[in-house]
């Protein structure tokens, strides 16, 4: 009776198993998203005045900053 050729095959390689190296790119992508979203600054309201007098009239409590 001839010997089967499949006796020397590693069957564990064909089984579905958890492999952590497959999760590395996903983990890097998720980390990058959180890191970049942490750098985002909140929006600020900006007012533009033609001269210091207009600025002082609009903001009497901060007239010193207008000059």
Image (cartoon, rainbow, N blue to C red):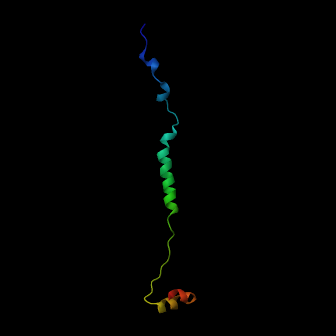
Residue drawn at (49%, 59%) of the image:
36
Image location (x, y in percent) of residue 51: 44, 90
Horizontal relation, residue 41 to residue 2: left or right: right
Q: Quadrant of residue 2?
A: top left
Establish if 36 lies above or below 20: below
Image location (x, y in percent) of residue 42: 51, 69
Residue drawn at (50%, 68%) of the image:
41
Residue drawn at (48%, 79%) of the image:
46
Establish if 40 lies above or below 55: above
Residue drawn at (50%, 52%) of the image:
30
Farthest residue in the right direction?
61
Which quarter shows the N terminus? top left
Number of marks in picture: 0
Farthest residue in the top direction?
1
Given residues 63 and 14, the one toward you in this image is: 63
Image location (x, y in percent) of residue 28: 49, 50
Image location (x, y in percent) of residue 27: 51, 48
């Amino acid at each position: 009776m001839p010997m089967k050729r499949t006796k020397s095959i590693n069957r564990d390689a064909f089984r579905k198993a958890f492999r952590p190296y497959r999760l590395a790119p996903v983990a890097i992508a998720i980390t990058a998203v959180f890191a970049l979203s942490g750098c985002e600054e909140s929006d600020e309201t900006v007012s533009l005045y033609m001269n210091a007098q207009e600025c002082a009239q609009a903001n009497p409590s901060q007239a010193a900053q207008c000059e």
